[in-house]
Image: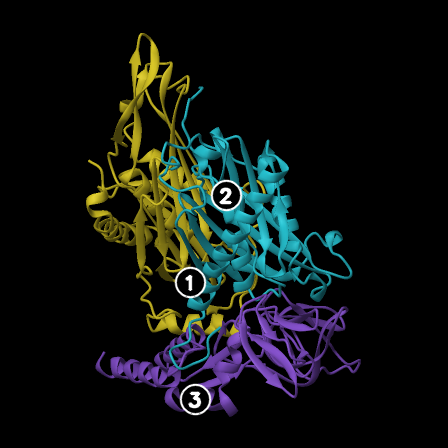
Chain colours: A purple, B cyan, C yellow
């Protein structure tokens, strides 16, 4: 679907990524159409991350003020972590730390993260991918990310906002994981992607053994 | 330097051999730059343009933000070596005017209410000019907006109609622009049947303008198909899968 | 996909910085390169026919377009027997989220001046053969570099694209007729180049030198330096372009490393240009 393309002229309701005109529903973004319970929506193939309540996101601590901490979520979004009034904060955070947290609220006043359940990520490499590709990186019921875990032995933290941390025991395993993520991001919408990812990881393992 | 140029020959052919209603060869590609949220490259004859989109993002300076909608910022700029006589650095008055009309055209279709207090930056960089730079520019900008996932009512496409030796012609090149009698750039949201950019430089009768608009509208539908093809190619799904 | 970094020369993302240090101890970089490897380079010339010379260079994802325009003008008063050239670089807002529209900022000005220095101090262009009437009329070359896409190291990419445009350019030819300057229609000539200047940007992390840094490395570097070399490996330009301490004892090593890399880059560039080189 491309913007302006007709999606439905027989009574479906307009969902995200669409608009109505004269009783018909049209696409507003480039993407794949989906109908759920009579609501037609377009899953966009690109676009910046828009924070929503309940999303698990990864961010970088960029400012520390008396009662609040600013967290960069990428895409030029700065979220706020409001610390409870108690003297001992749950985690000691410093500038440049990487955290994973849940979005408590997102609206005109800003994006707020929940200090409850917040994790500080201790080691690894932080990368950014297009937020629209995150579902593909995770895979149906987590299948793709499980595959990467199994084949590379790395740990992964995947933020809905497109920030991802890869942490492995060897440089080559991390490099393999990042190469695979790069491939998934580039070819998110094509068939046979899983097979190509497996091939890539096999060939990188092979290089390492012979190299 | 005065130049006597015959713009239409005895066979009704133009200086580059085209018939009056013929477009120049067009080539478009989406997603050509990596660091922007969306981008596109276009060639229309000798005109070559890059367009890139950033956003929605925070507004700088803050006092420009609007409480109920996004601000669109558009910059049309030509490289110094894009024209025959080197263009000095900095923005000329022409570039400032074109930045405004391009911005207003895109504002007509972008759903700005979805992003209050945010900004969408659109950059159009002409690296070679051969007539029709604002129309090719807006075609590329629209493709870049779609590539960036910015919600819009339609893809905007554009072309410039001209009058040379009394004949209404489509997609004027630089020579026709310089030595012709009139030039009329038109941008439309073809699926809405609406005009989003219209200017006229020179003299045309009301009938000539109507005829020119009709010619432009048909061409714009063709140009829009190229934009759709470019998007589909960029987000290509292998055979058997779903198409964009 | 990019390796996330924080702003420009701000503090680094801690875990990534730690990883970069660990990897360097093993002689590796975060993107799999060796410390002394450049990213893949592609060069396309003659991309803008209206320009008198043009080239697009991609260094990894960094992409720079240079165009050259020639006019006739007056020489500098203290150099009546030389043609004139100027270099101007712009960090287009297209290229990166923090590049803003407007007059060139200090980064763009620095880039212009460093590229200029590499070309000027190496006497790369034979300016004496670009004179029409001594003291009055000379060829003027405008070399304009536009950064289209930024993924680290615009210096080396800009020098490569400027040199590629110069080496493959074909400029209008003028002659003097009865004291007036006349363009010779239909004739073009190459730009007289004496040497092929190449720059090498090197960053320092702890005591490891690495070339061609990407933005995430730039946010972690102790400091960096750009060195421009001529074809016979004489140094024509040096710019320490970031704050930080550069141990004097490491400078010699940097200059030698840069020399070797510049020779390799020059070979690569000339290989890419092949027959397009006019001379």
Quote the CA–CA distance across marks 3 and 1: 31 Å
* Foreground pick, B204 / B83: B204
Instruction: Tell me the residue that label 2 is attached to.
Output: B133
Residue C123 in sight in this render: no
Q: Tell which subunit mark 1 falls on.
A: C
Check whether the beta carbons of the residues at disc 3 and disc 1 lie within 8 A of each other: no
Q: Quadrant of the C terminus of chain C?
A: top left
Badge 2 element: helix
Q: Position of residue C229 (x, y in %)?
A: 29, 43
* Foreground pick, A91 / B141: B141
Establish if A205 lies above or below A26: below
Q: Position of residue A16 (x, y in %)?
A: 65, 75
Establish if A74 lies above or below A138: above
Q: Tell which subunit mark 3 falls on.
A: A
Q: Nearer the viewer, mark 1 or mark 2?
A: 2
Badge 1 element: strand
Disc sitting over residue C205 in the figure: 1
Q: Tell which subunit mark 2 falls on.
A: B
Instruction: Tell me the residue that label 3 is attached to.
Output: A149
Crowding at mark 2 (Cα within 10 Å: few <14, some 14-19, many 20+): many
Occupied quadrant, residue A119:
bottom right
Q: Position of residue B12 (x, y in %)?
A: 39, 36
Q: How many marks?
A: 3
Quote the CA–CA distance across marks 1 and 2: 46 Å
Residue B89 in sight in this render: yes
């Amino acid at each position: 679907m491309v913007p302006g393309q007709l999606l439905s002229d027989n009574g479906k309701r307009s969902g995200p990524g669409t608009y109505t005109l004269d009783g018909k529903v049209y696409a507003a973004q480039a993407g794949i159409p989906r109908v759920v319970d009579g609501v037609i929506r377009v899953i966009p193939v690109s676009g910046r991350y828009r924070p929503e309540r309940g999303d698990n996101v990864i961010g970088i601590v960029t400012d520390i003020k008396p009662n609040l901490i600013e967290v960069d979520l990428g895409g030029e979004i700065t979220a706020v972590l409001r610390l409870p009034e108690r003297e001992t904060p749950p985690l000691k955070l410093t500038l440049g730390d990487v955290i994973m947290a849940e979005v408590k609220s997102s609206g005109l006043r800003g994006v707020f993260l929940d200090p409850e359940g917040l994790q500080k990520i201790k080691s690894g490499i932080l990368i950014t991918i297009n937020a629209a590709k995150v579902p593909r990186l995770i895979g149906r019921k987590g299948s793709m990310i499980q595959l990467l875990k199994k084949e590379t032995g790395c740990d992964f933290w995947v933020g809905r906002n497109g920030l991802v941390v890869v942490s492995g025991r060897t440089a080559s395993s991390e490099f393999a994981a990042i190469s695979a993520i790069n491939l998934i991001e580039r070819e998110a919408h094509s068939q046979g992607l899983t097979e190509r990812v497996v091939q890539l990881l096999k060939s990188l393992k092979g290089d390492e053994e012979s190299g | 330097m005065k130049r006597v140029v015959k713009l239409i020959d005895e066979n009704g052919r133009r200086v580059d051999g085209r018939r009056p209603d013929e477009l120049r060869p067009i080539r478009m590609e989406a997603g050509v730059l990596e660091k922007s949220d969306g981008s596109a490259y276009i060639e229309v004859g000798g005109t070559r343009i890059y367009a890139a989109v950033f956003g929605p993002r925070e507004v700088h300076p803050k006092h420009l933000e609007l409480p109920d909608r996004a601000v669109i910022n558009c910059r049309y700029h030509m490289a110094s070596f894009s024209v025959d006589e080197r263009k000095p650095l900095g923005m000329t008055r022409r570039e400032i005017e074109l930045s405004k009309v391009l911005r207003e055209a895109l504002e007509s279709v972008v759903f700005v209410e979805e992003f209050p207090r945010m900004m969408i930056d659109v950059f159009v960089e002409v690296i070679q000019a051969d007539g029709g730079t604002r129309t090719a520019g807006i075609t590329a900008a629209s493709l870049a907006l779609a590539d960036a996932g910015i919600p819009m009512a339609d893809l905007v496409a554009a072309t410039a109609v001209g009058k040379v030796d009394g004949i209404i012609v489509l997609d004027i090149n630089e020579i026709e622009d310089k030595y012709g009698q009139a030039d009329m750039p038109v941008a439309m949201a073809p699926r809405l049947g609406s005009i989003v950019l219209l200017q006229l430089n020179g003299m045309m009768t009301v009938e000539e303008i109507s005829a020119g608009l009709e010619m432009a509208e048909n061409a714009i539908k063709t140009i829009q198909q190229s934009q759709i093809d470019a998007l589909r190619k960029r987000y290509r799904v292998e055979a058997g899968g779903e198409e964009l | 996909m990019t390796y996330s970094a924080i702003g420009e020369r701000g503090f680094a993302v801690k875990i990534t910085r730690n990883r970069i240090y660990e990897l360097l101890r093993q002689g590796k970089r975060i993107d799999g390169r060796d410390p002394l490897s450049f990213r893949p380079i592609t060069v396309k010339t003659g991309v803008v026919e209206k320009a008198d010379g043009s080239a697009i260079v991609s260094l990894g994802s960094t992409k720079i377009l240079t165009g050259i325009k020639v006019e006739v003008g007056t020489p500098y008063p203290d150099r009546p027997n030389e043609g004139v050239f100027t270099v101007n670089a712009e960090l287009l807002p297209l290229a990166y989220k923090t590049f803003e529209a407007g007059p060139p900022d200090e980064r763009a000005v620095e880039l212009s001046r460093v590229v200029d220095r590499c070309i000027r101090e190496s006497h790369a262009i034979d300016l004496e053969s670009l004179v029409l009437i001594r003291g009055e009329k000379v060829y003027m070359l405008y070399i304009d570099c536009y950064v289209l896409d930024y993924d680290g190291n615009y210096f080396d990419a800009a020098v490569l694209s400027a040199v590629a445009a110069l080496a493959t350019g074909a400029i209008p030819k003028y002659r003097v007729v009865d004291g007036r300057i006349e363009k010779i229609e239909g004739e073009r000539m190459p730009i007289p180049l004496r040497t092929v200047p190449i720059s090498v940007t090197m960053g320092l992390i702890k005591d490891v030198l690495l070339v061609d840094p990407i933005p995430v490395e730039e946010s972690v570097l102790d400091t960096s330096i750009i060195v421009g070399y001529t074809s016979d490996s004489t140094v024509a330009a040096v710019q320490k372009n970031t704050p930080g301490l550069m141990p004097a004892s490491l400078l010699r090593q940097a200059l030698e490393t840069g020399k070797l890399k510049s020779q390799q880059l020059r070979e690569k560039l000339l290989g890419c240009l092949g027959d397009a080189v006019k001379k």
